[in-house]
Structures are given as structure tokens and as C-alpha cells.
Image: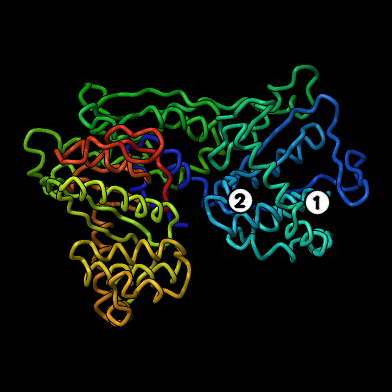
Amino acid sequence: MSISKSSTLLGVAGSFAIGVLGMWILDEKPTAVAAPDPASPANKVTGTAVVRQANPGAVKVELYAMSQCPYGVQAEAMFKEVISAFGADIDFAVEYIGDILPTGDLTSMHGPKEVRGDTLQLCARQYSEKWFEFVECQNENYRAVDTNGESCATRVGLDPAVLKTCADGPEGKSLLEASFKKAKDRDASGSPTIFIGGKEYNGNRRASDVMRAICGAYSESKPAVCNDLPVPPKVDVVILTDKRCGEDCDTTPIERQLPNLMGNPSVTVVDYSDPAGKKLFEAIKPAQLPAIAFNETLAADKEADEKLGKNLRKAGSYRVADVGEWNPLCADKDGCSLAECKSTLQCKPEEPNTLEVFVMSQCPFGVKGLDAMKEVLANFDKAGAKLNFKVHFIGEGNESNLGSMHGQPEVDEDLREICAAEHYGKDRKFMNYVWCRNKNISDTKWESCATPATGIEASVIKSCSEGDEGKKLLAKSFAYSDSLKFGASPTWLVNGKYQFSGIDPETIKTNVCAHNKLAGCENKLSGDTPAAPGGQGAPGCGE
């Protein structure tokens, strides 16, 4: 999965962890995880279900994940070393994050395929000593967890018929319901979430650091492995910010996430307006703020150096990560006259009453954001307000070679949706097609959404999307998104200048109204806690 630096622009708040952390660790492919030895006395089979017994005093370790979440997959791979080191000295389990609908149906963020994968993995845990080995087998292609269960069962010696009977029947549903409830009880909504000894673990997700946390959770005698864990070396870290940037340059999320990248960071924050900040900027420019500067002490933490080093640029005696998009020079007097500043959001002229969204058509978060616009637009329309709404697409390539994160099916849908916007833009009629498609965005029978009911003609969409017109439109849209360095779906832009993230109607409305005086702004829309203007941290594809 390609990760754009622009995903870290979303106020940096919350998205440093997803954008930069994700960029630095997700390029590592998961490795096979060693399961507990089935011959161990800690495991015994009663009937067909497996009963596992950890050693007395073993620390309970819980990993809450989603079977199709790449971050959860990475965390499961990390636990290879942990399980190998502790064995039965930890009571380890993987639980799953999802929702139980009022109808009794089960749902998860990545859709029915993920629900199926979750169920298969729980059934494997129910009937095989090698359940974690089964999970790791599925993780070799985690996008296919709904279909690769049989082959993975065969690989680990689990009868595929037993697995299927469990997953297809009430037992599998009951297991997943119980797992979802455990996640709810733990308030675990992000994949992965780790609990050690009953307490949420927010430290580094490196095996060595997780093992140190496990050792710290022992109340009495510790396993021998705890005596051999090295003390992590101190790493000096300087974060350069600019108070003129506002909340987009808030360094708190960065400071909070640095322990996820190294064992012992020593952090100093300096402002561009201070002499120390000016001096650092001169040493590392050109720099986009917030910027993180590491000195030679990073090399002492070999694991952190290996993970981060290839994504840092060399600047004098520093190695630097530009995790924001703020150019302090553009905010200086006459800064917008500089060539490097003219195209930046900082210097763009404002376009009142305008809302733009940048999406990938098959991204579940983008789908939710576009669906939320039904309530947002209805609210402003009812109030008689005029909101200029535009949809753009995130991808790469030119007219002859278009690409997107979720593959060719997403490019094909992007083409159809941008053609709908081009030919049915009046009164935003094209959104009828988008909202219809979002009910089942992966369905190849798109023509069912181009009917008199939506006001869209299938022949018009087909001619445009399969011809040169659609390719030119989409290439132009991709180029516009790239020029703004937007790589996370959805990314919102108010008045062509103010960026935010969010996927619920209230968050979208709040950010529009923060920069425009529109009728309807006083109305409360649906959504969780209303976000403050510029609120960041919502999930998205590409982060």
C-alpha cells in the first residue's frame, strides 16, 4: 500500500500515528508466527474443542484487531517474537472489533468479507492448537480472509469441514458476538488495540518494548526472558513547529506517538519564531512543519534506525521527517510572493461557500463521507443556502495509465463517477448515482444506478467512462489532488483553503460553517461528538 506524505497533513493531530507511523512500519511484510507447541502440556483437547491453560500467574495479553486491517496484521506479525519468548507465561488472545446491529447482524469496518475472516479465525481458535498459525496463514493475503480459510486449515492440520461447520453455523456467530462484546467492553475501536495485564498498552509496538511491558505487569516472580531484555538507548528528538500554523502544527500527537517508534525518545519542541527554531530551520531547510529532526543518537537504537532511516532525508548533521505541510517562509512578510508559496494552501485565495472532497471511490471511509453529504446538502438546501460542492479523486498516473489504491475496479468506478459529475453536475444530480452506488460500491452491475430513478443515463456514463473523455477528466482530477498533496480519502477542503477530515454530517457542517456564514449552520446534524473547526484524526484510506 502506497502511503502519501500528505496523509500526515490532516492537522498532524492523530494522523501522524496513522500517516507517518503507518508509512514507516507497513512496508514490512508480515512474517509467519510460531504458534504454541500443540504437544505442550499447556494445551489439551477435550472432545473437539481446544482448552488452553497458561502457566500460573501468566500475564493476560489481549490484541483487538480487524482481520482485514493492515495495522492489525502487522501487530499480529509482531507477536511472533513475543509468543516465542514467553510461551505459556502469557495468556494471549486475539479478539475482534465490530458491531452487532439491532437486527442481530454482525458488521465490521471493512465489510462482510472481514466479518467472515473474523469468524473463521475464531473458529480456528476454538478447534485448533495452531489457531495463531492459521491466522498468520490468512494474513499472507489478508484481503482474501473470506476465501482462504480452507487452504489455511489444511496447512495447519485443522479439518476444513470442522472449520466450515463452525463458521457457517450459530457457533461461529456466537463466538464473534462474544468477541465484539469484549472489544466494546474494553472500548477498543482502533485496530490494533493492545491490553497487557488488564491495562491498555500505548507504547511502542516493537516486540522488545511489548515484552518489557509484559515483564512490568508481573506482580511476583518474572519469567527468565525478562532478565535478558536490554535497556533501550536514549534518542534525542527535536520537533520544529510554528505557532502561526495553529492546530495543524500541534505537536502533541507527534510527542505521544514517538514512543511507538523508539524505546527511549528525549523530546525538545522549538518554535520557528525562537532563535533556536530559526537556527534549526536554517540547518534543515527546505522543511515543511512540523518537522522532526534526529541527530546521531538515532543510530544507537538500531531497530528504530532501521525502520525510520530510509524515510528520513539528510540535512547537515540531522536526519529529518517533514510530517506537515506548513512552509513558515510563506507566512513571513511578502512570503506569498515567493515562487514556492504561490500554489500552497497558505497563499491560495479564498473561494467562499465552497466545499471540495477528495476521495477514492471504493474506500469505505470515502463512501461514508460522501453518504454523509446527503444530510449536509439537504440541510443547506432546506435553509436556502448555496453551497458549491465538488468531488475530486485520488490516484496516480496519466490518461494512458491510471491507477488507484484499490485496483482497477476502483479506477473504473472513479471514471463512472467523474463522468456522472461532468454530465449531471446541475443541481448535483450526479450524487444520486454516487449514493446509489455506495449501497454496494463493489457491485459490478453499476447500470442499476443509472436509471430514470436517479436521472442518470447508462449510455452517457458508458460512453464517457470507457472513452477518452473519462480518462482525461480523471487524470486531471488525480493531478489536482496530487498538486495539493492530498492522499487520504476522504480529505475535505473548505473555500479552497481550509483542510479537515471527518466522515459524519455534523463534523462536515461544523467545518463548513467555521469559514462561512450560511443559513442552516445553526442546525444540529447527526454524528457523534461535533468536531471543532479543523478537527482531525478521522480514519481514511491512504493514511
**CA separation, marks 1 and 2?**
26 Å
Does residue 219 appear in this view? yes
- Frontmost residue, 513 versus 377: 377
**Residue type at mark 2?**
Leu
In this rendering, is residue 463 above or below 492?
below
Q: Position of residue 371 (x, y in %)?
A: 37, 54
Q: Residues within 10 Å of mark 2 (few under 14, many from 20)?
A: some
Task: Give the residue drawn at x 59%, y 60%.
Answer: 113
Q: Position of residue 310 (x, y in %)?
A: 45, 47
Q: Position of residue 348 (x, y in %)?
A: 13, 46
Does residue 315 appear in this view? no
Residue at the far top in the pictured view: 220
- Frontmost residue, 129 versus 177: 177
In this rendering, is residue 440 above or below 216?
below
Task: Give the residue drawn at x 29%, y 62%.
Answer: 431
**Residue type at mark 1?**
Lys
CB atoms of marks 1 and 2 within 8 Å: no
Residue on which the image places disc 2: 106
Task: Give the residue drawn at x 35%, y 67%.
Answer: 414
Determine whether the residue tagged by mark 1 lies in a helix, strand or loop.
Answer: loop
Can you tell which quarter of the image residue 390 is in?
bottom left
Q: Earlier in the sequence, mark 1 or mark 2?
A: 2
Task: Give the residue drawn at x 69%, y 26%.
Answer: 197
Q: Residues within 10 Å of mark 1 (few under 14, many from 20)?
A: many
Image side of residue 153 versus residue 444, left or right? right
In this rendering, is residue 193 above or below 127?
above
Residue on which the image places disc 1: 130
